[in-house]
Amino acid sequence: MFFKRPQHPKPIFGKLEVFARHCYASKISSHKERPPGFSQEKCFRNLLSTIDRSKANLTCFLDTPPYVSHFVDTEEDPVIRFERGSEAASFLYLLEHIASLSLHPDTIIYIVEDDYLHRAGWAEVLLEAFSLPGVDYVTLYDHRDKYFDPSYRKLTSKLFATESCHWRTTPSTTNTFATRFQTLVDDLKIQKRYSLNRTISADHQKFIALQKKGRMLVSSVPGFSTHAEPKFASPCTDWNLYLEEELCNSR
């Protein structure tokens, strides 16, 4: 039996708009186990080395005191400095900035935290996900806990396929995700609700609320990115290789 390739539910408009959010010192993640050789700067170098400039624009957001030097300042991409001092407050600032932009409704927005690693080709793969009918949110992070955490024992997923990989529906992800500009604007109240009056955003609860609204979130299988936390890293990839200097610094 032959299946027709799914048609784009909406046209992919222009380039991806990537917003990379950094902070000078994150107390939130100080307790987390990290892979050998980890640093936020290496994650940033990895992002630079894997981003496809023909498909994506990059803007950096830096939550830090104005007098503090930071590695993102050495790059040519736009850097927006501000000072909010907590993960939730900085995420709210980023949301407000994006929502204020004059972007085409179908522009794909990709928000990236500063402790993520990416495989080459991720931009093209991310765009592929939005060719799937009904997809509202996309993550390239295949959460490992979905495979071993007892709370997900009864988790069921729909599977899809695009040119480069499979995709599965998933209930939640972190504050590293992609969506269309209009979807972000339409969901802005929910996006903000789970960061207001908090130090750390309640991202899991937020995506559960979006799911109840009828939004579909999918993740790539295998993951084309990972949160740099070994216990929960995307399976099937040796992410330690992506922290090696030659991979981080290659352009």
Image (cartoon, helix red, strand yellow):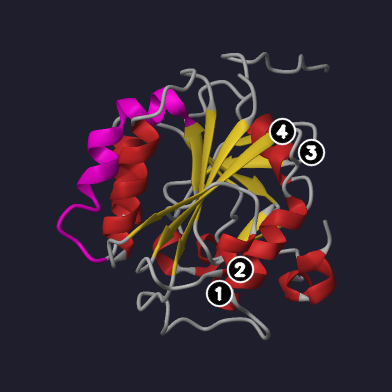
Q: Which residues are magenta?
A: 180-199
Q: Mark 3 and 2 residues: CB-CB less than 8 Å, in contact?
A: no
Q: Mark 1 vs mark 4: which is more N-terminal?
A: 4
Eye-nearest disc, 1 or 4: 4
Residue 55's label in the rendered image is 4
Residue under label 1, please give it: 229
Q: Mark 1 and 2 residues: CB-CB less than 8 Å, in contact?
A: yes
Residue under label 2, please give it: 233
Q: Mark 1 and 3 residues: CB-CB less than 8 Å, in contact?
A: no
Q: Is residue 234 visible?
A: no
Q: Nearer the viewer, residue 22 or 239?
A: 22
Is 196 situated left or right of 13 in this image? left
* Badge 3 element: loop
209 to 199, vertically: above or below = above
Q: Residues within 10 Å of mark 1 (few under 14, many from 20)?
A: some
Q: Quadrant of the N terminus?
A: top right
User: Which residue is rendered at x = 69% and y = 17% of the image?
Assistant: 6
* Badge 2 element: loop
Is 52 situated left or right of 146 in this image? right
The amino acid pointed to by label 4 is Lys
Disc 1 and disc 4: Cα gap in Å? 28 Å
The amino acid pointed to by label 3 is Ser
Q: Quadrant of the C terminus?
A: bottom right
Q: Is residue 36 visible?
A: yes
The amino acid pointed to by label 2 is Ala
